[in-house]
Amino acid sequence: MFEHYLKATKSAISFICCHAILSSQSIHAQDEKTQAVFPPVPIESVARYTALRAAGPIKVDGKLDEPSWLNAPRSPKFVDLISGKAAVHDTQAAVLWDDEYLYVGYWIEEPLVQGKFTERDSPIYQDNDVELFVAGADAYYEFEINSLGTIYEGLFVWQSAFESKGYSKIAELDQTQPEVKFQPFNGVGLTTHPRGKRWAYLKWDFPKLKSAVHINGTLNDAKDRDRGWTVELALPWSGMKLLTMADGRSAPPKNGDVWRIDFSRFNQYKEAEPAKDSGGWAWSSHGVWDSHVPEVFPFIAFSAESVP
Ligand SMILES: [Ca+2]
Ligand SMILES: [Ca+2]
């Protein structure tokens, strides 16, 4: 969801044409409101979850039919991104892990499964999408996927840590190299984050990431009513070096380690009034129209225990 902002700043096309969610007036109001209160939701209300180890192999085919998925604890139903109120369609997620991968599964109820983008790094947020953010201490990763399985991803590094934590010396982030593409980024709704701006690397690819979707229904066919779709992800721990380098955390994690990981979906529709549907739903409410706030990401503790 970050690129709305980038596009808006680049081309002066209004922010609202992309996600068509908030008027610029209400964004401003949101900013003013959240300026004084940070994080935008109380820390006690941020979701907590314990991720168990997978009990067997996970085939990344979009089908969450492995015994590990069937037995993994699931998130509560996703709630409205801003208000935390119930969403019209059911969305749940689960997390598993083993020595090689972090696995994430999403169950997405959707009566009209649709998608248009087929080219990698297209503006997936202009489709109905599912998003994942994985936070390190001084950098975070964003991933988006649509029902066609097309992905969009990027890496963000807090500018205040860029030199001091050694990111500037990493070849793939080295801003003196002409082939390294980067841009400043300041959030999409919360532009007053106390940590300030990030450097956005939108050409960055998570090494050896595996992703797949499975549609339970018919794609781009409104004649029927679909069940929805599922998303299956495997992120190799070996690809997380830029997320772990600042605090030296273990990847794979140690028993009891806690990471901040965010799970959300964004829709091109909104539930009719009187619902106050922002169009974005998340495992744990963000309190603002912005996912670039690691302080509101769910606490995901990793347990050495396997799923039953
Ligand atoms: Ca599978
Ligand atoms: Ca359909």
Image (cartoon, rainbow, N blue to C red):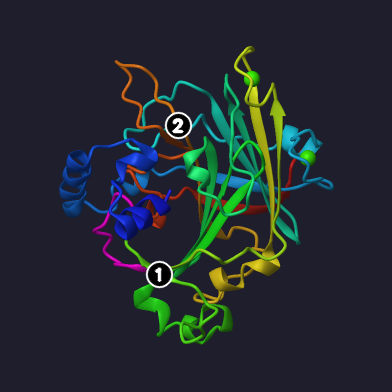
Question: Which residue is painted at 55% across and 79% down in the image?
Answer: 179
Q: Is mark 1 within 8 Å of ligand 1?
A: no
What SS does tag 1 mark?
A: strand
- Residue 48 appearing in the image: no
Residue 240, position in %: x, y?
A: 62, 67
What SS does tag 2 mark?
A: loop
Question: Which residue is painted at 57% across and 84% down in the image?
Answer: 171
Q: Nearer the viewer, residue 279 or 6?
A: 6
Left or right, 79 with respect to 258, comes to left
Q: Which residue is mark 2?
A: 268
Whether residue 36 is situated above or below residue 158 in the rendered picture: above
Q: Is residue 277 magenta?
A: no
Q: Disc 1 and disc 2: Cα gap in Å?
A: 27 Å
- Residue 236 appearing in the image: yes
Q: Is mark 2 within 8 Å of ligand 2?
A: no
In the image, which residues are magenta?
Answer: 188-198
Quadrant of image for the C terminus: top right
Q: Nearer the viewer, residue 72 or 102?
A: 102
Query: Looking at numbered disc 2 in the image, what kind of residue is underneath it?
Result: Gln
Q: Which residue is mark 1?
A: 183
Residue 152, position in %: x, y?
A: 57, 53
Q: Nearer the viewer, residue 174 or 196?
A: 174
Query: Looking at numbered disc 1 in the image, what kind of residue is underneath it?
Result: Gln
Left or right, 260 with respect to 20, comes to right
Q: Residues within 10 Å of mark 1 (few under 14, many from 20)?
A: few
